Amino acid sequence: MERALTASLAVWVVFGMGVPASAYAQANEPGPPKIIHRTNPHGVGLSAPAGSTTATSPILNHGGPIILTPTIYIIWYGNWNQSNGSDTPAGQQIVHDFAGTLGGSPYFTDINGSYGVAQALLAKETTDSYSRGTRLRDADVQLVVTSAISSGRLPYDANGVYFVLSSSDVSELSGFCKMYCGWHTAATPTVGHIRYAFVGNPNRCLNACAIQTVGPNGNAGVDAMVSVIAHELDEAASDPDLNAWYDKNGSENADKCAWTFGHAQYQVANGAWANLPLGSRNYLIQRNLFHNLLPPSGPVGDYCMMDGTQN
Ligand SMILES: [Zn+2]
């Protein structure tokens, strides 16, 4: 149930279940619908849930486009040169290294290959020093992207996925830390058709948007952030216009595996858990859904995996 619908009545019907409508009304903003990555249902703790090894309900192809080779663009929003130990140049380096190596990893290519996606590349990064303030609305996030393009700080790229990564002093009023940890969507403003995502630094709400309080790279907020970035990239590649791959409940591939971290976890020197070595770093990221996986990993079906063989 990951689709944030535009009509408040629909939001009430879908998300109702005794929860006050106002709890979700903030997500009901003008602009394109977005697919949210819900907050951690387990709570932050000492171990990350491995998750199920059995097949999920099937994901379905609704006929929309995928992005064969998504290019990653990063907009560092707010102030990433703070003294809080998280919104720092070292924190940016963790994301930079992750985004530069993820797209060629078996995590990305094996699993997203099952949707026809080839690989992802990190293209370019830029900064935005609070052009829309510290309290963003969804429309502000889109303006942050379009102004980066129209000003020439980032190119227009029809295969681009533009990530707005906010420092932890920035709120996103439609529900960051309360309802979601990130989201992605598509729109066609005057710069052209764009796919973009918002991911905030979970340092402001580790209990909601992190799975452990010590990250494998020593930055709990940013170490949690890369897991959300991987999730949104998986989905933006396989369902960029929200009309391609999702299941009967509206869940996209990574939604079906959200907050599960697989059975190949290991501890690194600072005691944090990790499940993905890339380059010189270790990360703990959520699994993604392998569509129509063949034996020997199990009967043909859709499985939450770390790559083509490891669940
Ligand atoms: Zn999602």
Image (cartoon, rainbow, N blue to C red):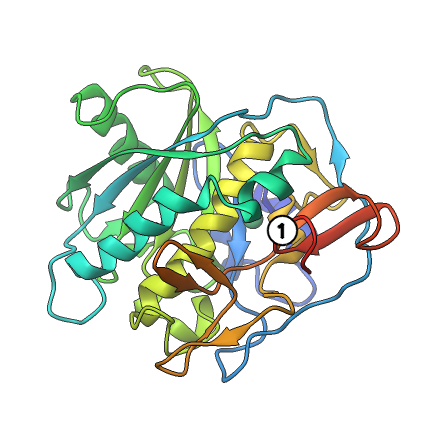
Looking at the rendered structure, the kind of residue marked 1 is Asp
Quadrant for the C terminus in the image: bottom right
Count the numbered circles shown.
1
Q: In percent of the image, x 31 and y 19: which residue is there? A: 156
Q: Tell me the quarter of the picture where residue 132 sits.
A: top left
Q: Is residue 311 above or below residue 111?
A: below
Q: Which residue position is annotated with label 1?
A: 307
Residue 103 on image: x %, y %: 46, 40
* Residue 26 in sight: no
Q: Tell me the quarter of the picture where residue 298 sits.
A: bottom right
Q: Is residue 62 above or below residue 262?
A: above
* Residue 62 in sight: yes
Residue 102 on image: x %, y %: 44, 46
Q: In this view, does 9 lie above or below 85?
A: above
Residue 49 on image: x %, y %: 61, 73
Residue 160 on image: x %, y %: 40, 27
Q: Is residue 127 above or below residue 206?
A: above
